[in-house]
Image (cartoon, grey):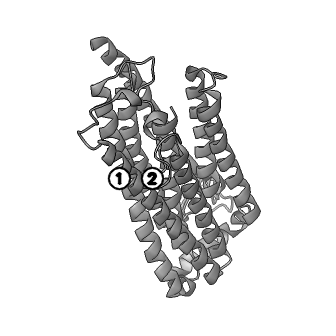
Amino acid sequence: MSSENAELNHDEHGEHESMSRGKIWKVFAILLGITVIEFIIALWLVPKGHIPLHWANPIYIVLTLFKAFYIVAYFMHLKFERIGLMISIIVPILFIIGLILVLTNESHYWTELR
Amino acid sequence: MSAQVSSIDELKTTPWAGGKSPFNVEYGKMMMWFFLLSDAFTFSSLLIAYGALRFSSSTWPAADLIFQSVPGMIDHGAPLVFVGLMTFILIMSSVTMVLAVEAGHRMAKKEVVGWMIATIIGGFMFLGCQALEWTHLHHEGFWWGSIPHELGEYFRKDEAVSVTSTHQFANLFFTITGFHGFHVFSGVVINIIITINVLAGTYEKRGSYLMVEKVGLYWHFVDLVWVFVFTFFYLV
């Protein structure tokens, strides 16, 4: 088992070098930058009336998805895995999107019931 | 007896031809990915329930009016500052975790230990902040099934005050951040166990720091969930 691990690790080594320390700090800067942008929107742009509230929410969601991409792709290293593993992780997420669509629709129906 | 090889006997070398793992990851790491996938479903169902209840209410308490304090320093008038600090701490501890994994690839034991300890400290800081935030909200009157008597200050001026949606907010807030905090706590415990193993030289003998990578996956997932909790509870 231990030799197997070492071998696997060795196999991946070439790919791991793409995640150098410089790259790690770059991804950190991106994540921090996106969070700072979200704060600027929430604390300055919306209260001062530069952006209406119904525009801010989709922007937050897009920015959050960007952050999620950077965490999963680089920190969790999924971008450098085999395509088979990527597909088997990402495709089931479609069920979550399905659930979001179904329950959003349902909640509009609940509003009418109240 | 012909020497010609029929096409069915030709050796296939594609990843799915058999004989080796098509994913090229170690068993435990693959199982960690699938566990995290199932955990993502659990968190999603909680957040989607929150979304559905919120969409179906005509009014909802505003986050930047509820989260106004930095416990122990500022009582009022600092919207979202404290949760910003918590977000920064968690992203930072995610970075130290990647650095521990990176040091593991170079088999640098001392560096792995250093970054793991930094990650554990980050985890404890986050948990401490969350405990302060919960205590503060509890003193204001929020808890599972209980809300303050005066609700006017939590709603925007153009929205009607609603007891029902404040109740829903309180229950969902403590359930979802509690479930996330429980994940952070178990992550810290696992990090401590792995750090002890690193110190004992277990992974040096094994020839790889793959276990650090696996616990790293879990830790980044905790960070990932917080990114969504932060957006949907504090911003939207």
Kindly tell me whether residue B210 is visible in this rendering: no
Task: Give the labeled residue for mark 2.
Answer: B71
Q: Residue at point 47% right, 45% down?
A: B69
Kindly tell me whether residue B106 is visible in this rendering: yes
Query: B188 and B130: which one is in front?
Result: B130
From what the image shows, is residue A109 above or below residue A84? Answer: above
Q: Marks 2 and 1: in contact by CB < 8 Å?
A: yes
Q: Residue at point 40% right, 45% down?
A: B43
Q: Residue at point 62% right, 55% down?
A: A82
Looking at the rendered structure, which numbered label has been put on residue B186? none
Task: Give the labeled residue for mark 1.
Answer: B135
Query: B167 and A58: which one is in front?
Result: B167
Residue A74 in which image quadrant: bottom right
Q: Are marks 1 and 2 on the same chain?
A: yes
**Residue B226, how many percent across, how many down?**
49, 48
Left-right relation of A68 to B190: right
**Residue B95, how many percent across, how many down?**
62, 61
N-term mark: 1 or 2: 2
Circle 2 marks a residue in which chain? B
From what the image shows, is residue B152 above or below residue B140? Answer: above
Q: Amino acid at mark 2?
A: Pro
